[in-house]
């Protein structure tokens, strides 16, 4: 099944009796970060759309106070996070993410006051559930993400002498 929405390509395939969900976003320029929209809800709640940055340097996903306020989230605990500016105690929230590839993931996320340029930071707690790739050529950059993991991507192995 193929669908097209807001310049993003979604593909749902059957692979080894598992549903494979994938998204590809093509940019007309070289990119220094990957951004997308995604939807978030309270567990069993209504989804709302937010802007996100995919960050392979972040071990866990983070939502801003804007997300907390719009979804009327209540904290379910606290934790201490370590960032580039030091450590900080933050609230934890139970949410459901609907990723751009239409894959739903329920998880605990950390809250923070703000994230420069977006509402949500998608960290390795989500990215590591699938395959994440960015390729660049003179015409621009392409971001692809799929769940579950597919075959190993080995650029060196694919080279031909």
Image (cartoon, rainbow, N blue to C red):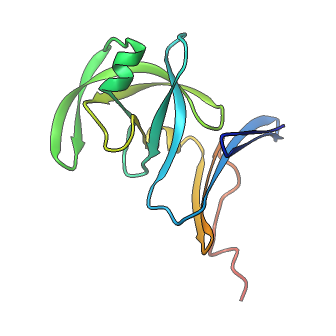
Q: Residue furthest bottom?
A: 161
Quarter of the image where one finds residue 110: top left
- Give the percent coordinates (x, y) of residue 7: 67, 46
| Viewer-side residue, 38 vs 17 | 38
- Give the percent coordinates (x, y) of residue 65: 30, 25
| Viewer-side residue, 151 vs 97 | 97
- As displayed, is residue 22 above or below residue 69? below
Left or right: 32 in relation to 131: left
Left or right: 26 in relation to 49: right
**Quarter of the figure that contains the C terminus:** bottom right
**Quarter of the figure that contains the N terminus:** top right
Residue found at x 66% / y 32%: 102
- Give the percent coordinates (x, y) of residue 50: 47, 31
- As displayed, is residue 4 above or below residue 63? below
| Viewer-side residue, 130 vs 8 | 8
- Give the percent coordinates (x, y) of residue 119: 39, 34
Residue found at x 37% / y 52%: 57
Count of numbered tags: 0
Quarter of the image where one finds residue 17: top right
Quarter of the image where one finds residue 100: top right
Left or right: 74 in relation to 36: left
Residue found at x 23% / y 27%: 90
């Amino acid at each position: 099944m193929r669908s097209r929405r807001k310049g993003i390509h979604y593909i749902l395939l059957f692979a080894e009796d598992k549903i494979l969900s994938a998204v590809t976003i093509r940019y007309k320029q070289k990119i220094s970060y990957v951004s997308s929209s995604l939807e978030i809800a309270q567990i069993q709640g209504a989804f709302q759309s937010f802007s996100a940055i995919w960050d392979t340097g972040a071990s866990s996903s983070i939502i801003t106070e804007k997300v907390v306020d719009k979804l009327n989230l209540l904290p379910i605990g606290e934790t201490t996070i370590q960032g580039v500016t030091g450590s900080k105690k933050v609230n934890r929230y139970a949410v459901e993410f609907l990723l751009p590839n239409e894959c739903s993931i329920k998880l605990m996320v950390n809250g923070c006051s703000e994230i420069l340029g977006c509402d949500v930071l998608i960290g390795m707690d989500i990215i590591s559930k699938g395959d994440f790739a960015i390729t660049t050529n003179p015409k621009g950059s392409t971001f692809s993400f799929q769940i579950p993991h597919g075959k190993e991507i080995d650029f060196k192995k694919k080279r031909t002498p």
